[in-house]
Amino acid sequence: MQRIAALTGNEAAAEAMRQIEPDVVAAYPITPQTELMQKFAQFVADGIVKTEVVLVESEHSAMSACVGACAAGARVMTATSSQGLALMWEIVYIAASTRLPIVMTVVNRALSAPINIHCDHSDSMGCRDSGWIQLYSENPQEVYDNVVQAVRIAEHPDVLLPVMPTLDGFIISHTLERVETLADDAVKKFIGEWRPAYPLLDVDHPITFGALDLQDYYFEHKKQQAEAMTRAKEVILAIGKEYGKLTGRGYGFFDEYRTDDAEYIILCLGSAAGTVKSVVDELRNRGRKVGVLKLRVFRPFPDGELARAIGHARAIAVLDRAEGFNAVGGPLAPEVKSALYKKSDADVCNYVYGLGGRDLSPVMIRSVFDDLAEGRADARQAIHLGVRE
């Protein structure tokens, strides 16, 4: 039995955390994540959950406390944004490399400078090679669903990697929408108990943790970590399917919207998908064969599945809500181009949009489809959509 509530994206994540009831949450407030942790801390203060909340003096300390608690054997969660994630940088690699299944919700926000509190994906994209699984959400419902599934994915014995569910700051985090939530016991049953194989607090079976690892074994450990990310693909699909049977909302690597016969396709992450879908409907009514693919899972990257889904298109526009500063474009487009290499004849164009919270309007999306149809999109270099020249 599912319940219906009006929740913001932050509240949806906090509600999922309440139902998961992790052993430890260590966090430091930062806009626009603050509401999420404030809501969860209120659950703890009211005695609704028994989680140990660790209030620290910085995000670096927050992730350090998460690593320590998870290594000790606790189920651990946290949340952050922007510069807070940047301040965790050193420790997010340690969390992944020591195979600790921490779940951290990232409320996407632009990185400084200049100071900006609004949404883009520069924070989570900066972590794309850190060994964390990344799930992107279109709306508060997907935030709730992704946070619940993230626990199962992270703790699966074939994976044991940290997971980063994300949501667009202010666009999703502070938008009130209809959200269907599971009953508390259904969530508890779905995620199960966390039984770590080698907890530090098991004093009867002492282990070495975080030892020096030079030329002799470091390479082997990195390969094992990479193999775990590969295995995560199968686990993500299985858990998404199981969650679908429970809720009626199944999840895969991506969501295809009117792409089957589409000649021109936009690929994007997060909240932009909703606006693109509305433009797709409008253009379809005019007889134009257009579609949108919303990528949910960015790490691990579903290259083969993506090529099979959209490789038939004449042209594809990849929307990046982050600048790569690589003189080519955003971080998502090269991954898509690599996935389609020798598997598709489609032209792949890159558009950087929405930095620092800049709006993505239907007019802009129509212009992208027009560019694709009329061969105006430059396939070699990114176009900055909506920027004043």
Image: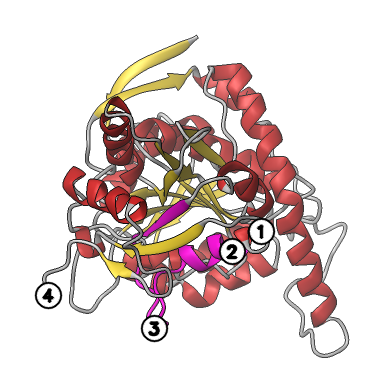
Residue 201, visible in the rendered structure: no
- Location of mark 2 (residue): 67
Give me the C-alpha separation between circle 1 and circle 4. 46 Å
Amino acid residing under circle 2 = Val
Give me the C-alpha separation between circle 4 and circle 3. 18 Å
Comparing labels 1 and 2, the label whose residue is closer to the camera: 1
Dot 2, crowdedness within 10 Å: few (<14), some or many (≥20)?
Answer: many
Give me the C-alpha separation between circle 1 and circle 2. 7 Å
Give me the C-alpha separation between circle 1 and circle 3. 35 Å
Q: Earlier in the sequence, mark 2 or mark 3?
A: 2
Left/right of residue 364 with respect to residue 102 in the rendered view: left
Q: Earlier in the sequence, mark 2 or mark 4?
A: 2
Amino acid residing under circle 1 = Leu
Picture residue at 66% right of the left edge, 25% below the top: 242
Q: Which mark is residue 100?
A: 1
Which x, y percent locates residue 126? 45, 71
Picture residue at 76% right of the left edge, 57% below the top: 228
Please provide the residue range marked out in magenta: 315-338
Left/right of residue 100 with respect to residue 88 in the rendered view: right
Q: Residue furthest front?
A: 374
- Location of mark 3 (residue): 327
Q: Earlier in the sequence, mark 1 or mark 2?
A: 2
